[in-house]
Image (cartoon, grey):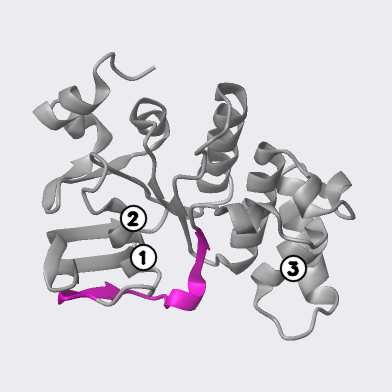
Amino acid sequence: MKATLIQCSDLGFSYENRMVCEQINLNMNEGDYLCVVGQNGSGKSTFIKGLVGLKAPAKGKIDFCGMTRSDIGYLPQQTVAQKDFPASVQEVVLSGTRALFYGAKEKRLAKEKMEQMEIADLADRSFRDLSGGQQQRVLLARALCAAKKLLVLDEPATGLDPIVTEQMYELIAQQNQQYGMSVVMVSHDVSSALWYADHILHLENSMRFFGTTEQYLETSYAAQLLGGGVR
């Protein structure tokens, strides 16, 4: 039986005294791949920020079972400023180790994650000179340097072409299936995301569904978001 990783109890978040997502009650276990779905403005990114400690709950609580927030690797939505960051690929990935000084241990870890993301040959390249897909691989490698038990991703494939998007999803799935990394991912590409996730959280400013992907596909919420169905 899988160990519980996260418990959310009547969890809610607000901005300027207005609740933007609430009534979130769920248990996430080690090894789960949870996809957070819903319309724009439904509270998905706010929930993600709450998980990683960037947003304090307005009510309820998050319990981490056998882990802390320092065990979480986080890949937020990339900004224009981040895309123009003047550092080498290796330097960006190393920053994910959260170490004050980079010794042999940190460099081995960064090398391992770059190899997993198939970007080891780009180590000395400038991050700002890479393609969008290459940059996302670098940032995913950086997040993995921090992730001990949980990888949290907010729209990791935004702005990428379909082929690169598919490659990104495959790399994330590999971390989950081959390396046992638990994953929480927000994605607007619901059809593809459901192909990989084993659990779904559907938000419409409150929790409307939490359960397995198979159960979700039987709901009216899935029908509304999917339209043409899962690929």
Picture coordinates of residue 42, whole percent (x, y): 21, 48
Span colored in magenta: 57-75
Q: At 90% across and 55% down in the image, what residue appears?
A: 124
Please say whether residue 50 is one of the residues in the magenta stretch.
no
In primary-sequence order, the first of circles 1 and 3 is 1
Instruction: In this rendered view, identify the residue nearer to me: 178 or 23.
Output: 23
- Indicate the quadrant where residue 216 lies: top left
Q: Which residue is mark 1?
A: 49
**What residue is shown at x 22% (from left), y 75% (from top)?**
57
- Residue type pointed to by label 2: Ser
Instruction: Provide the secondary structure element on which disc 3 rests.
Output: helix
Quadrant of res 49: bottom left
Give the amino acid at mark 3.
Leu
Q: Secondary structure at mark 1?
A: helix
Q: Residue at x 33, y 20 (%)?
A: 230
Q: Residue 65 placed where, x, y %? A: 33, 74
Question: Is 67 within the magenta?
Answer: yes
Q: Amino acid at mark 1?
A: Lys
Instruction: Say few, some or many: other residues with alpha carbon within 10 Å of mark 3 (under 14 / 14 to 19 / 20 or more).
Output: many
Residue placed at 81% from the left, 66% from the top? 108
Q: Is residue 38 left or right of residue 95?
A: left
Q: Is the residue marked by circle 2 packed among few (<14), some (14-19), or many (20+) residues within 10 Å?
A: many
Residue 45's disc is 2
User: If you read the primary sequence from the N terminus, does the residue marked by circle 3 or circle 2 appear first?
Assistant: 2
